[in-house]
Image: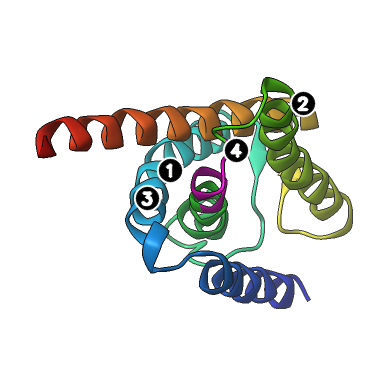
Amino acid sequence: MDNLILGACWIATAALLVILINRKNLIQAILSFLFMQVPSWLFGALVVQGGLIEYPVGFLQMVYKASFSFEFFIFPAVSAVFNVYFPQKRRWFAKLIYTLSFPTIITITEVQLEKHTHLIKYLHWSWYWSFLTLTFTLLLSYSFCLWFFKKVKTIRV
């Protein structure tokens, strides 16, 4: 059943990308996707090696003890959508709600998966650490995209 849930997550994530990412925002989405794999991998490796979280079931478990699916596909895809649709020209409150909604949804999902599946097991971890690291890495990715595309615009001129 756990592998079925994991497969459904891959399919849902791929569908989300196909629906929400188009030609106009493809470069920004790709940059965000690739960038997010680095901090996601780093935090994932640190929490697993530190004995804070365990992933008993997952793809590539024999060679990679952290969550390959989340760190290299699902969260980078979420980051791509987050960056592409960030409400840059809206008021600060809209930006705050938008920014907090992504880690909130992911954290609630993670807590449910931890309670009802073998996909993730908190050893010395709590939901608020997930929330904080997700928020931090999403904002890091957004800042990187802002910086990168500002540099690209200056080079073109």
Comparing labels 4 and 3, the label whose residue is closer to the camera: 4
Determine the CA span between mark 2 and mark 1. Answer: 20 Å
Magenta highlight on residue 105: no
Q: Is residue 29 above or below residue 136?
A: below
Task: Please name the residue shown 60% across and 64% down the image.
Answer: 58
Q: Which residue is mark 2?
A: 128
Q: Secondary structure at mark 3?
A: helix
Mark 1 belongs to which amino acid?
Met
Mark nearer the N terminus (2 vs 1)? 1
Q: Indicate the position of residue 133 as horizontal and vertical percent values.
A: 61, 28
Mark nearer the N terminus (1 vs 3)? 3
Task: Please name the residue shown 52% across and 61% down the image.
Answer: 61
Mark 3 belongs to which amino acid?
Gln
Image quadrant assignment for residue 20: bottom right
Q: Which residue is mark 3?
A: 28
User: Which quarter shows the C terminus?
Assistant: top left
Mark 2 belongs to which amino acid?
Tyr
